[in-house]
Image: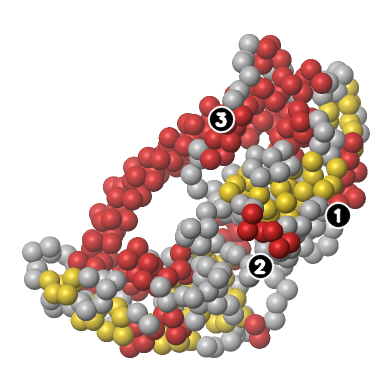
């Protein structure tokens, strides 16, 4: 084993391996799509790598024009080199032809095997945020010259092929195992949502007389419930942040949390928020927050006091509102679908206002019944949650194992040459399935232009 120096300590490398600058493997390319954007599929850099975005439901964030987007071909390396510390994934090897935001850097190589190896190595560095020595500025940006000058381990040509072949097979097996478990979680979550939606819109007793609500989205409701305007139940909080307010974060998966708590749960470092109180809004416990992705179900109930981006809308619940019941109702599929019809925006959820919220009527059970429904939902979903939790843990363990395995192989700590020699070549279609087969993990890299 040879001990060599680098800006990043890769430890002892196997004999025959060398350290080479990234620029000796890849070269920068940039071709804007311009007026031809309609001819390209839209791509995104996510935790699953570079994926094709589904435009049919207009989910996610979209610009008014794609003319500044750039072309990406199969085999191109896509990098997000700003906000690196907070970005979920900054490295991806595209197996698709399409376009991606011009804010990213796209590289290609004449040596496909070397690029496959380099991508695996960069993914390991990205996973561990080991590129920190290259960061510059408050936004933790990696200058292009610093990236291209970075010296990385480079195995012999024979070892490169062995590593890539071994990891292709290993990652495909692990991806299939993860996808199967994610499918089980999806089925359990679907049942969970069905149980919740039935209770919040149909009440506790299916035998109770129902009447048409005269509101398309809610259909029949128990006869003793009222149908009222949203405005009569929720006022609009316009108050700016107060001195001492802690910064909050809105998350569809975690709700409203203090920013430091959210970042800790996500495994990210807390970055200083350089904003003034004049562009933040105050949030009180029991407020509802309409987030930027409310048309996807991002209408969250806050249990904490603090401040949040002025892009969000705060709702103050009235005395007839039980927070836990309406937190369930306002995230029900029927309501989210109806809320989406109030938008005529290009970017999903952008600039949703109080006026959008007020366009829909809401069911109003008696206050005590709201409490009982919320309590019964907790009871009904408890068993489902207990079934889901160990499967999610197994998925996390598989992902941890995959990360550790790739790390050990690409840095030469695990010699896989003998095992790789026994493996057949893999179908390129199966390599696409390594990413496509797994559900979820679609959180994007930062897309600032």
- Residue 62 shows up from this direction: yes
Q: How is the image coloured?
A: secondary structure
Residue occupied by mark 3: 430
Asked which secondary structure carries label 2, the reply is loop
Could you tell me how many numbered marks the image carries? Answer: 3
Q: Residues within 10 Å of mark 2 (few under 14, many from 20)?
A: few
Residue at 55% across, 70% down: 346
Residue occupied by mark 1: 143
Camera-side mark, 2 or 3: 2
Q: Is residue 286 left or right of residue 24?
A: left
Asked which secondary structure carries label 1, the reply is loop
Q: Is residue 350 above or below residue 56?
A: below
> Along the polypeptide, which appears first: circle 3 or circle 1?
1
Q: Residues within 10 Å of mark 3 (few under 14, many from 20)?
A: some
Q: Is residue 278 left or right of residue 211?
A: right
Disc 3 from disc 1: Cα separation: 34 Å
Whole-percent x and y of residue 92? 68, 44
Disc 1 from disc 2: Cα separation: 27 Å
Residue at 54% across, 88% down: 239
Quadrant of residue 169 within the rendered picture? top right
Disc 2 from disc 3: Cα separation: 33 Å
Whole-percent x and y of residue 185? 39, 43
Q: Is residue 296 left or right of residue 370?
A: right
Residue occupied by mark 2: 65
Q: Is residue 348 above or below residue 226?
A: above
Most foreground residue, 139 or 67 = 67
Whole-percent x and y of residue 321? 31, 79
């Amino acid at each position: 084993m040879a001990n060599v120096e680098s800006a990043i300590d890769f430890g002892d490398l196997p004999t025959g391996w060398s350290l080479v600058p990234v620029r000796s493997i890849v070269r920068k390319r940039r071709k804007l799509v311009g007026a031809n954007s309609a001819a390209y599929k839209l791509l995104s850099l996510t935790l699953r790598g570079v994926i094709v975005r589904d435009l049919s439901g207009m989910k996610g964030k979209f610009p008014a024009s794609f003319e500044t987007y750039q072309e990406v071909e199969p085999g191109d390396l896509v990098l997000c080199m700003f906000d690196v510390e907070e970005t979920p994934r900054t490295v991806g090897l595209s197996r698709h032809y399409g376009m991606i935001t011009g804010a990213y850097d796209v590289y290609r190589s004449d040596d496909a095997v070397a690029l496959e190896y380099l991508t695996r190595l960069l993914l390991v560095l990205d996973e561990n945020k080991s590129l920190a020595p290259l960061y510059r500025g408050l936004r933790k940006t990696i200058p292009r010259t610093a990236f291209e000058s970075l010296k990385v381990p480079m195995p012999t040509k024979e070892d490169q092929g062995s590593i890539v072949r071994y990891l292709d097979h290993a990652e495909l097996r692990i991806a299939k195992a993860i996808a199967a478990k994610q499918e089980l979680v999806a089925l359990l979550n679907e049942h969970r949502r069905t149980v919740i939606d039935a209770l919040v819109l149909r009440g506790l007793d299916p035998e109770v007389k129902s009447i048409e609500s005269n509101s398309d989205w809610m259909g029949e409701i128990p006869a003793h419930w009222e149908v009222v305007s949203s405005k009569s139940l929720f006022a609009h909080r316009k108050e700016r942040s107060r001195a001492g307010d802690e910064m909050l974060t809105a998350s569809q998966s975690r709700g409203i949390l203090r920013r430091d708590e959210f970042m800790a749960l996500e495994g990210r470092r807390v970055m200083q928020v350089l904003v003034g109180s004049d562009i933040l809004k105050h949030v009180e416990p029991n407020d509802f927050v309409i987030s930027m992705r409310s048309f996807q179900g991002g209408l969250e109930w806050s249990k904490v006091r603090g401040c949040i981006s002025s892009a969000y809308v705060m709702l103050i619940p009235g005395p007839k509102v039980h927070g836990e019941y309406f937190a369930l109702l306002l995230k029900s599929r029927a309501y989210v679908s109806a809320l989406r019809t109030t938008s005529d925006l290009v970017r999903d959820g952008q600039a949703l206002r109080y006026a959008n919220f007020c366009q829909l009527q809401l069911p109003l059970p008696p206050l005590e019944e709201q409490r009982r429904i919320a309590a019964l939902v907790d009871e009904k979903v408890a068993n489902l949650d207990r079934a889901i939790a160990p499967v999610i843990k197994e998925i996390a363990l598989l992902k941890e194992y995959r990360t550790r395995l790739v790390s050990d192989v690409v840095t030469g700590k695990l010699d896989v040459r003998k095992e790789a020699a026994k493996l057949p070549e893999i179908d390129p279609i199966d390599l696409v399935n390594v990413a496509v087969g797994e559900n979820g993990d679609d959180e994007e890299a930062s897309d600032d232009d």
